Image (cartoon, grey):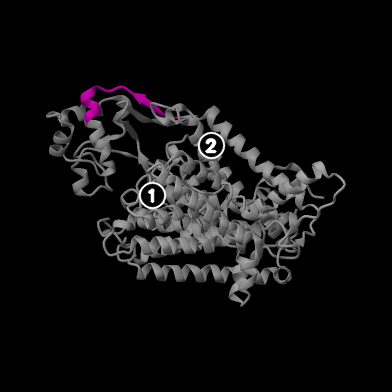
Amino acid sequence: MNVRLLFKLLGILSMLIGAFMLFSLFWANPKFGQHTDFAIDHDRFEAEGFWGLLYSTLISFSVGSVFLLIGRKGSGRLFRKEAMAVVGLSWVLATFLGALPFVLSGTSRGPAIRVFEESRQVMVVADGWRFWESWRSVSVTDEQFDVLSVVASRSARGIGEFELEVLSRQPEAAQVFEELCERGPLRKWLLTPGDSDDLAPADRASNFRINWIPMGFVDSMFESQSGFSTTGATVLSDLEDPYLVPHCILFWRASTQFLGGLGIIVLFVAILGQGSAGKALMRTEVPGPTHDNFNSRIQHSAWLFAAMYIGLNVILAVVFLFLGMSVFDAICHAFTTMATGGFSTYNASLGHFESLPGTHGGAIETTVIIFMILAGTNFTLLALTVLGQPKKLIADIEFRSYLGILLVATTAIVLFGYWHADVECESVGKAILNSLFQVVSVVTTTGFITADFDQWNNFSRGLLLILMFVGGCAGSTGGGMKVIRHVLFVKILGIEVEHSFHPKVIRLLRLGGKPVDDQNLKQSILVYFCLIMGLFVLGFMFLLTFESEATWGPSAENKLIDSASSVASTLNNVGPGLGTVGATQNYGHFSDPSKLMFVLMMMLGRLELFPVLVLFSPSFWRDQ
């Protein structure tokens, strides 16, 4: 193992991440980081976000300098072993460095108190890390519950005394709230008017409020890995409050997805495409035959793909501007669309634009659908199309299967939606648009949301859960298992079925009418499917066994499906799932050990398993 060369390349990566943090600094200035929705305040310089990013930049550059110093004499060719080590370690390093801005800026992830109306139960975040338990129940009187539920409904902004008395129907609401502040478990998390809070503006500081939980390093690692792996899962509950999540941090959050979407092309091949390493890594990402004219110049092709990726980002950002988005929102959503990441700057994701004056919600949805489909298409075929060979795209079996899956799944969800009368729209056209958007978003593993699909019928929800295991095309920015693997799996299954009753018949594995030359492809496809299923089962059983039932509140009856959905969503880099991690929920309420498990699942899913798994093999690190 060429250790010095590893440190040299990891040092370059650290410098690259630090440089991108610098671009996020500008958005701390209110002149730059304005939302499309002017109702969201951004009229102050975000000092906490600015200094958090600046300190993170300095740390990244410092780490990079140390690594470059250690690897200053690193030289030689990058062979397959070193290439896989750099890829795996670079994503671990990126997760740590990318987490720094969230921690150092004081970004808050969610309220420290949860109120459940149906059971009239109150839960408070456990003080400190209590291993698996993140929440504990607190008993309150009926009067205290009525007051606390009203305050909780106003999120971090709180509520004034007169309005609190009216809505809670408690004439002594202020006194009741002050009594709650004396309760041991609640004392730390409740704020009365006049309590010191340097970040709160005057109108907020004069309210009764619930304090929010600052992001710890585990939360920040989760958000960072979700960005770099383009998963789009989040622990943040309120993206529209700049006092909780600064605009410059939102931009950094989107930038991690831009880097992650680009990294699967540039990092794997362009930077590491020395000798046979680039082709070896491309085979890991693109199972089956590839186009020979691109394989012969693999590094040149990677830079061509990178240029296409950046170009599509620019085009999409300009289109968003014409459709009414602000510069800030246009760039952030372009970054996260082409990366198939799904991070938004609004709590309702892209659904926020549907009723926002001055924007074209329907046109934005249609535009995003088109670009999500492009982002989930094999970039080799897109490059060939740009170079004047569109027939190869149309003739490709994976691309045709990809479009077929989108069409069939959308049709099924529309039909069952009307059958169960749960289609959230006023016309057939809107039903098709809503269904198509969610199907494309799940299949391409983007994770954008325009409708609460968790309220749909069981068939539609189940179908979306199955689609999480499909993914985009190989060689795209989409995550998941990839369509080509499913195509090959079906063909292999057909050959094996025929062989069971015609054992003497020799049937070649063909793809696009041509025999597949790779003799080990059948075995590698089966091994990959077994590994994915094995990891899914391990993650699923981990949550069922160790995650506290307090995570689900007063009732854990949906723990089974919620656990399966959350593991499937993170392992396949989808983001939102069903139930407790559904379209309107997030992952913030899980315990730290479970979040670390999700971090590993996201990394394994994005890097196609092997570059991460080899890091745990002692023989991999031995010199041979």
**Rendering coords of residue 261 (x, y %):** 54, 59
Asked whether 138 falls inside the magenta stretch, the response is: yes
- Secondary structure of the residue carrying tag 2 is helix
Marks 2 and 1: in contact by CB < 8 Å? no
Tag nearer the camera, 1 or 2: 1
Q: Amino acid at mark 1?
A: Ala
Image quadrant assignment for residue 345: bottom left
Give 379 or 86, whichever is nearer the viewer: 379
The answer to whether residue 263 is left or right of residue 503 is left
Q: Which residue is mark 2?
A: 564
Residue placed furthest toward the bottom: 388
Q: Which residue is mark 1?
A: 451
Give 170 or 558, whichever is nearer the viewer: 558
Image quadrant assignment for residue 211: top left
The answer to whether residue 324 is left or right of residue 396 is left
Q: Amino acid at mark 2?
A: Ala
> In this picture, is 521 found above or below 265?
above
Residue range of the region highlighted in magenta in the rendering: 134-146
Residue at the image position 55 percent from the left and 44 percent from the top: 466
Residue at the image position 71 percent from the left and 54 percent from the top: 3
First in sequence: mark 1 or mark 2? 1
Give 4 or 217, whichever is nearer the viewer: 217
Give 59 or 160, whichever is nearer the viewer: 160
